[in-house]
Image (cartoon, rainbow, N blue to C red):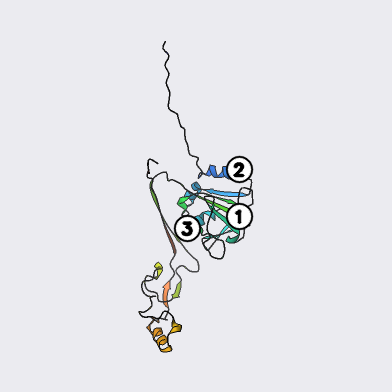
Amino acid sequence: MEHDEMVLDEVVVSGRRLTGSELAVLSEVRKANVVANGISSQIIQKSGDSDAAQVVKRIPGITIVDNRFINIRGLAERYNAVQLNNVVTPSLETDIRSFSFDLIPSSQIDRVLVYKSPSAEIPGDFAGGLIKVFVKGVPDQDQLTIDYGTAYRENATFHNFQRPDAGSSYWTGFNTGENDLPENFPENLREVSSSWRNAAGHALRNSWLPQQSTGNSDQKLNITASKRFNIKNH
């Protein structure tokens, strides 16, 4: 018998922990030493919600204000902290701390956790609760998701309203020329004479008669695309 030696290359076994499954979220909530609730991406896909505001309102103790701000156990958004991937989110208001949850499409949410009691491992600068939103990382595959939804408001939809004359494209939110100032309009009316000020006022459109319009249903369109690509074999 002859002795033979062979050196094998190293064997690397790698895996990825699923965090967006219902079982993973229940396990994370159970391990937390605080009062917590959570919702997984599996539940979000079944619910058909279009953004994070509609997702978090399904969690007990949370109400939505203006379809974007949150109240936890009756406390306004200024008393609640929000983190995105464990990073404190910036405030969208100048005078109070608030975060607009309708900015995040539901298709990009991995899981949402709500902590309603303080603990050593989470920030303590909240009175109502702390919401942690985790978004998905590298997509599993190339995909394109289009979500379209409508909503009916009892006292507004299909009711008649009066509005200023702003042109036929006012609903887009863009100025199509109806709100433009005339040419040679003075930059500061206080620095011109009364006659020139009177002429500048007559140069405006001066359309004071209201226009009749009908309130349409609320509409929302979300388009989400994801694509995998390699950079230097990564």
Disc 3 to disc 2: CB gap under 8 Å = no
Looking at the image, residue 160 lies above or below residue 8: below
**Quarter of the figure that contains the C terminus:** top left
- The residue that mark 3 highlights is 103
The residue lying toward the viewer, choosing from 41 and 116, is 116
The residue lying toward the viewer, choosing from 225 and 149, is 225
- Three-letter amino acid code at the position of disc 2: Lys
Q: Earlier in the sequence, mark 1 or mark 3?
A: 3
Q: Position of residue 34 (x, y in %)?
A: 63, 48
As helix, strand or loop, the secondary structure at mark 1 comes to: strand
Cα gap from disc 1 to disc 3, whole angstroms: 20 Å
Q: Residues within 10 Å of mark 2 (few under 14, many from 20)?
A: few
Residue closest to the far front: 191
**Quarter of the figure that contains the N terminus:** top left
Q: Which mark is residue 31?
A: 2
- Three-letter amino acid code at the position of disc 3: Leu
Looking at the image, residue 228 lies above or below residue 61: above
- Three-letter amino acid code at the position of disc 1: Gly
Residue at 44% x, 82% y is 189
Q: Earlier in the sequence, mark 3 or mark 2?
A: 2
Residue at 45% x, 73% y is 160
Labels in figure, total: 3
Q: Position of residue 57 (x, y in %)?
A: 54, 56
- The residue that mark 1 highlights is 129
Q: Position of residue 183 (x, y in %)?
A: 35, 79
Residue closest to the far top: 1
Q: Earlier in the sequence, mark 1 or mark 2?
A: 2
As helix, strand or loop, the secondary structure at mark 2 comes to: helix
